[in-house]
Amino acid sequence: MKNERGQISLAALVLLPLLVLIVGGILVLGLALALEAKATTACRVRMAQSQAEAGKALSELTKLNGTAKTLEATRQSALKALKASIIVPNPAARAAALAALKTVELAQSPVRAKQLYWLAKGKQVSSMAPFHARQGIIESLPKNLRAWLRPARIQTQAPRFHLIASSTIHRTPTYSPAPNFQQSQNGVIKWKNTLKVPSERNSISDELSLDNFLPEIEFGCSMTLEPRTGGHWTPQPTEDKLLSNSSSS
């Protein structure tokens, strides 16, 4: 009996560390997956906000196409009339053509200003999309865990807001999305990290690595713009289901 009890006690002593390790690993893995889900959601929210702003810029820009086209056609007609009045000298016709040209060019100025504004706006919010998504990831995590994020492990692709103008010589050209617009507008952020828990002294050299217990976590999202009826553009996720290495391994 004593032998049996001794064997059971010995077995318990041998298995206890393994049991603690398994339970601890499950708890840490659960924490990791919860952090991954929260951070990925934050990434999607911020990316969607940036893409929505770019979509508004594109919508507002294309709304100006009708007016821009009409004004440019009127300007071209005034230019032809002015050239004709020069070839066949006619002071009255020349004055009328010149007045018409100045009038239409004056009308084009505010339209062109709006075009340039929405172009700049679309490019600016697109280029900043990965940055805002990254900030969303950071802010979604507890402050005491932000130190283990590794900037060197981040991969980003900023949307290009690639549009094509109808002409480079028109004062108010029309704009349309490039043929590959949805591909070039795709914004991507991928951030792989391995959790590290700081020691009591908060020294980087004294950090306790959990690499043997916790697989890499991948935060990220991918989103572009998709056309809707009425000339509107809305954010559209393009990512495959983001899986951590722990679930894909």
Image (cartoon, rainbow, N blue to C red):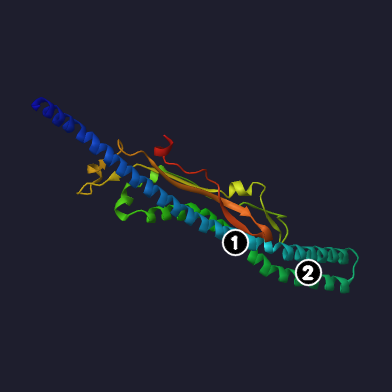
In the rendered view, tell whether residue 189 sits above or below residue 229.
above
Query: Which amino acid, mark 1?
Result: Lys
- Residue at the (36%, 53%) spot, across then down: 141
Q: Could you say which is closer to the camera, residue 12 or residue 169?
A: 12
Expressed as whole percent of the image width and height from the top left, the position of residue 53 reads 55, 60
Q: Could you say which is closer to the camera, residue 44 or residue 57?
A: 44
Q: Could you say which is closer to the camera, residue 200 or residue 174?
A: 200
Give the label on residue 101, or none: 2
Q: Say what secondary structure mark 2 lies in.
A: helix
Instruction: Rate crowding at label 2 as few (under 14), some (14 to 19) or many (20 or more) other CA atoms within 10 Å.
Output: many
In this image, 224 relative to 3: left or right?
right
Is residue 231 something one can see in this rendering?
yes
- Residue at the (67%, 47%) spot, across then down: 179
Is the N terminus in the top left, top right, bottom left or bottom right quadrant? top left
In this image, 224 relative to 72: left or right?
left
Expressed as whole percent of the image width and height from the top left, the position of residue 15 reads 21, 32
In this image, 224 relative to 31: left or right?
right
Residue highlighted by disc 1: 56
